[in-house]
């Protein structure tokens, strides 16, 4: 799962890190995940995103069940201190069903008098 955000105004001092908090299964608490979303890593600072495996979200300390919504809050900081914590993001669900196939097209070379050829991604 990708968690992304827009970089805030740094007020004249470069952002040196982010703290990414993810809501836990109690639907109230938020926990840091430094294994996958360690906001002091330069790649995360530059990209303003991190990727956390769904299996990590399903285990401790998050313990999110299939079908639950995932929400995150973020704090930015520079050498002068921390921002206030962001509002929670718009969330997404841990789904158990696949996405719908897309780019459905007819394969004309496979067409016969009694069947159509179709491909999709």
Image (cartoon, rainbow, N blue to C red):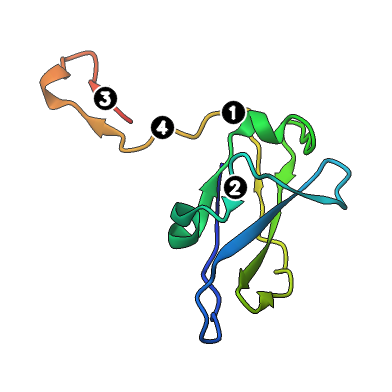
Q: Circle 4 sits on which residue? A: 101
How far apart are the two marked residues, 2 and 4, measured between alpha carbons?
30 Å
Name the mark on residue 55: none
- Closest to the camera, between mark 4 and mark 3, is 4
- Most extreme residue toward the left is 109
For label 2, the residue is 37
- Disc 2 to disc 3, how far (Cα)? 41 Å
Q: Nearer the viewer, residue 77 or 64?
A: 77
Foreground tag (2 vs 3):
2
Residue holding disc 3 = 118
Proximity of marks 4 and 3: CB atoms separated by less than 8 Å: no
Of labels 2 and 1, the one closer to you: 2
Direction from residue 20 to residue 102 in the image, left or right = left
| Residue furthest out toward the bottom | 12
Please name the residue that numbered disc 1 is placed on.
97
Residue count near mark 3 (Cα–Cα under 10 Å), binned few <14, some 14–19, many ≥20: few
| Position in image of residue 9 (x %, y %) | 54, 81
């Amino acid at each position: 799962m990708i968690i992304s955000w827009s970089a805030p105004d740094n007020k004249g001092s470069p952002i040196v890190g982010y703290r990414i908090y993810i809501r836990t299964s109690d639907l109230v608490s938020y926990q840091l995940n430094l294994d996958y979303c360690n906001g002091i890593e330069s790649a995360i600072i530059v990209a303003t995103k991190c990727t956390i495996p769904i299996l990590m979200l399903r285990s401790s300390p998050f313990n999110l069940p299939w079908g639950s919504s995932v929400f995150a809050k973020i704090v930015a900081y520079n050498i002068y201190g921390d921002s206030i914590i962001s509002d929670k993001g718009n969330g997404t669900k841990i789904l158990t069903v696949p996405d719908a196939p897309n780019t459905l097209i007819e394969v004309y070379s496979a067409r016969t008098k009694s069947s159509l050829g179709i491909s999709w991604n």
